[in-house]
Amino acid sequence: MSRIGIFGGTFDPVHVGHLAAAVWVRDALELDRVELVVANEPWQKLDRPQLSPAQDRLAMVEAAVDGIDGVVASSAEVDRGGLTYTVDTLESYRAGDSDGSLFLILGSDAAGGLDTWHRYEEVAELAEVVVVDRPGAVGQRPPVAHRVVDCPLLDLSSTQVREWADAGRPLDGLVPAAALAYCRQKGLYG
Ligand code: ATP
Ligand code: MG
């Protein structure tokens, strides 16, 4: 029976905080793999006009996970198109593999806001909710059954990375090299 971790996000851009969380949860829960599911149009971020194109965010995640055991990029939401709701994604995984176990991985900021999500109670029935703490949101927990996985606290966000890029600060070591090469080639950020 497969054990799959679903780690959704905008990944604008992917950074080492995402990768470390994915790898540590994979290891702690002995998952077969963690899928970084790139949101097509995240409903939480519709007010952000400068959101990078989904195909570019996906390409950066694909580049970033290359060579990391048991961590892969998923284009499921980008392929589906339209607004991104996690409940739809979990339902489609369930339809594809009805007896596997699904684990929904959330940083604690996202976990703390889970009750604002579309059909969040169903989300929690479709997958076991797994929380990793994140600086600025340590101890925030969802109002549903969940488990917490210990992970290094990396004080890094895509918002901060974009701000540093705009300010001309170096991003090496914060964004995986292959993803950074892609964003330089495409002229994304800064
Ligand atoms: P933004 O600043 O644009 O919101 P972000 O860094 O929060 O970007 P997202 O794509 O919004 O990244 O987050 C995807 C998932 O990764 C969320 O569950 C979020 O909580 C988690 N996450 C992001 N950064 C970290 C981090 N440094 N440590 C642990 N979890 C993280
Ligand atoms: Mg975020």
Image: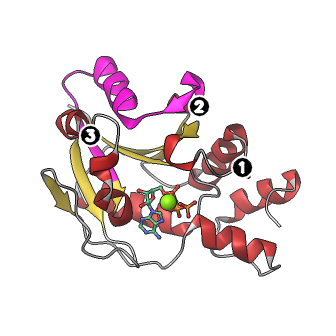
Q: CA distance from mark 2 to mark 1?
A: 18 Å
Q: Is residue 164 left or right of residue 4?
A: right
Residue position marked by numbered label 1 in the rendering? 49
Query: Which quadrant is home to the C terminus?
Result: bottom right
Mark 3, Cα crowd under 10 Å, few <14 / some 14-19 / many 20+, is: some
Residue position marked by numbered label 3 in the rendering? 120
Amino acid bearing label 3: Tyr
Scheme by which the image is coloured: secondary structure
Mark 2, Cα crowd under 10 Å, few <14 / some 14-19 / many 20+, is: some
- Queried on whether the Cβ of the residue with tag 1 lies below 8 angstroms from ligand 1, the answer reads no
State which quadrant residue 38 falls in: top right
Q: CA distance from mark 1 to mark 3?
A: 26 Å
Magenta extent: 78-105
Return the disc, 2 or 1, that comes first in the chain's sequence.
1
Query: At 72% across and 42% down in the image, what residue appears?
Result: 53
| Residue 143 on image: x %, y % | 17, 54
Amino acid bearing label 1: Pro
Return the disc, 2 or 3, that comes first in the chain's sequence.
2
Whether tag 2 and tag 3 are in contact, CB under 8 A, the answer is no
> Looking at the rendered structure, which numbered label has been put on residue 8?
none
Query: At 22% across and 30% down in the image, what residue appears?
Result: 100
Instruction: Label 3: state its secondary structure.
Output: helix
| Residue 159 on image: x %, y % | 61, 67
- Residue 82 in the image: above or below residue 120: above
